[in-house]
Image (cartoon, rainbow, N blue to C red):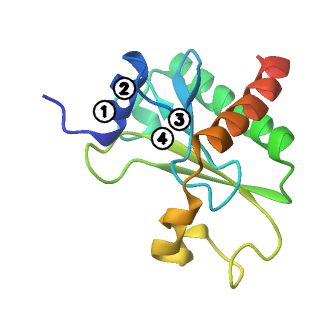
Amino acid sequence: MCDCMVCERINRIKNGKNPYFVRELNTGYIVMGDCQRFTGYTLFLCKQHVTELHFLAPEFRDEFLHEMSVVAEAVYNAFQPDKLNYELLGAGRGVHMHWHIFPRRSGDTPKNGPVWQLGDLLYAQESIPSQEELENLKIRLNTELDKLV
C-alpha cells in the first residue's frame, strides 16, 4: 500500500470523494487548496508518482509543464491577483510532485516573502471555505479553464 498523501487525494478524486477536485487534465489533477488564506490557492497534482521533473519521460514532462502554465493562467484570470507564486513540491509523506499556485496580493503577508512565513496561520480554521464558497471557487476556475483547454 502506498503511503502518499497526494496518491490518497488522487484516489479520492477517482472515487468521487474529493470535494476540492476541479478538473482532470492529461498529466494531472487540479484541486483547490484545503485552506484559502490566499483566495484561489490551487494545486496541480502530477498523475505519476515521482519526485523530480527529470524522472518524467520528456514528452510527459513537457505536457505537464505546459498544463501547469495553463492552470496558472486560469487561476490568474479567475482570481485577478497582483502576482502568482509557483512552487513545485514533493516533500512530506510519499514524496509526490505537485504544484502549488498561490494568487498573491499586495499586503497579504506581514512582510514581503513566501506564504510559508505565515506558519500555522496558512492553515487556520477560518481559511477553510464553506461548501458554498468552495463551489464558487471551483466554478470561477472551471469557467476560465473552459476558455483555455
Q: Residue at x 78, y 34 (%)?
A: 140
How far is the residue under mark 2 from the one under mark 3?
Answer: 10 Å
- Mark 1 falls on what kind of element? helix
Q: Please name the amino acid that badge 1 sits on.
A: Glu
Look at discs 1 and 3 and give the one toward the viewer.
3
Instruction: Say whether residue 53 is left or right of residue 149.
Output: left
The answer to whether mark 2 and mark 1 are in CB contact below 8 A is yes
Look at discs 4 and 1 and give the one toward the viewer.
1
- Mark 4 falls on what kind of element? strand
How far is the residue under mark 4 from the one under mark 2?
Answer: 16 Å
Residue that badge 3 annotates? 20
Residue that badge 2 annotates? 12
Q: Crowding at label 3, few (<14), some or many (≥20) Cα neighbours within 10 Å? A: many
Q: Which mark is residue 98?
A: 4
- Mark 3 falls on what kind of element? loop
How far is the residue under mark 2 from the one under mark 1?
Answer: 6 Å
**Residue 82 point in image, percent of width and height:** 86, 60
| Residue 48 in sight in this render | no
Q: Please name the amino acid that badge 3 sits on.
A: Tyr
Residue that badge 1 annotates? 8
Q: Please name the amino acid that badge 2 sits on.
A: Arg
How far is the residue under mark 1 from the one under mark 3?
Answer: 13 Å
Q: Crowding at label 2, few (<14), some or many (≥20) Cα neighbours within 10 Å? A: some
Among the two numbered marks 4 and 1 on one chain, the one whose residue lies closer to the N terminus? 1
- Mark 2 falls on what kind of element? helix
Q: Nearer the viewer, residue 39 or 71?
A: 39
How far is the residue under mark 4 from the one under mark 1?
Answer: 13 Å
Look at discs 3 and 4 and give the one toward the viewer.
3
Q: Residue at x 63, y 62 (%)?
A: 37
